[in-house]
Amino acid sequence: MKIGLIQGTSQKEKKILEHYIKQAISPDDELINFGIYQDRTTTLSYVQISLAIALLINSRALDFVVTGCSSGQGMMLACNTFPNIHCGYIPTPQDAYLFSHINDDNVVSFPLGLNWGWSGEINFSETMKALFTKPWGKGYLTGEAKRKIKNTKEVKELNQLTKKL
């Protein structure tokens, strides 16, 4: 899987994100950091970054993107305005695990400012580990898996229909 990392410019000092994602992904996966670096003067809004994410996913240059901004919510909402983009908000390991196991989608947004304080990097690390636990898209809980997979498919179909209007 080709995974991209693109965080909001307001959070460019969080240079440790790449390290924790690399620890969480499979050795067969490739991580590409799209370079929102401290030493760069370019600033991009979360709206501009969401457009870049949509282009990268829809062109199939990437399979998955980890992103975020101060709260994570603006980035999630902006990403979800584009066709074929299904972005989840994952502030905790539980949210990340449920996202990948039930929703099996292509973008996640993490709050990189909100609640980052003491031990924020530990929460990020554990959230990435939970997110990249395989297999994805099998549903959760086992007794509810078929229903959850069916509901996820319906949401994706409805999402595509409404974006064609």
Image: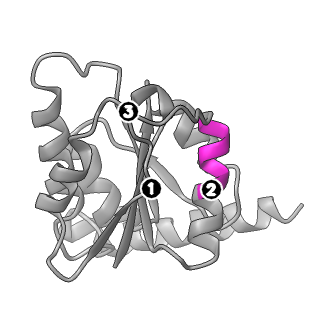
The residue located at (56%, 79%) in the rendering is 60
Looking at the rendered image, the disc whose residue lies closer to the viewer, 3 or 2, is 3
Inter-mark Cα distance, 3 to 1 = 13 Å
Magenta span main SS: helix
Give the residue at x 70% y 56%: 82
Q: 30 above or below 144? A: below
Magenta residues, start to end = 46-52
Relative vertical location of residue 12 with respect to residue 104 in this rendering, above or below = above
Q: Which mark is residue 52?
A: 2
Instruction: Examine the image and state in which quarter residue 114 appears.
Output: top left
Horizontal and vertical percent for residue 74? Answer: 56, 32
Task: Please state the horizontal and vertical placement of residue 165, each as a whole percent of the image.
Answer: 90, 60
Q: Secondary structure at mark 1?
A: loop
Q: Are marks 2 and 1 in contact (CB under 8 Å)?
A: yes
Callout 3, which amino acid? Gln
79 left or right of 165 in image: left
Q: Position of residue 1 (x, y in %)?
A: 34, 79
For mark 3, does the 10 Å Cα neighbourhood hold few (<14), some (14 to 19), or many (20 or more) residues?
A: some
Which residue bears the numbered disc 1? 34
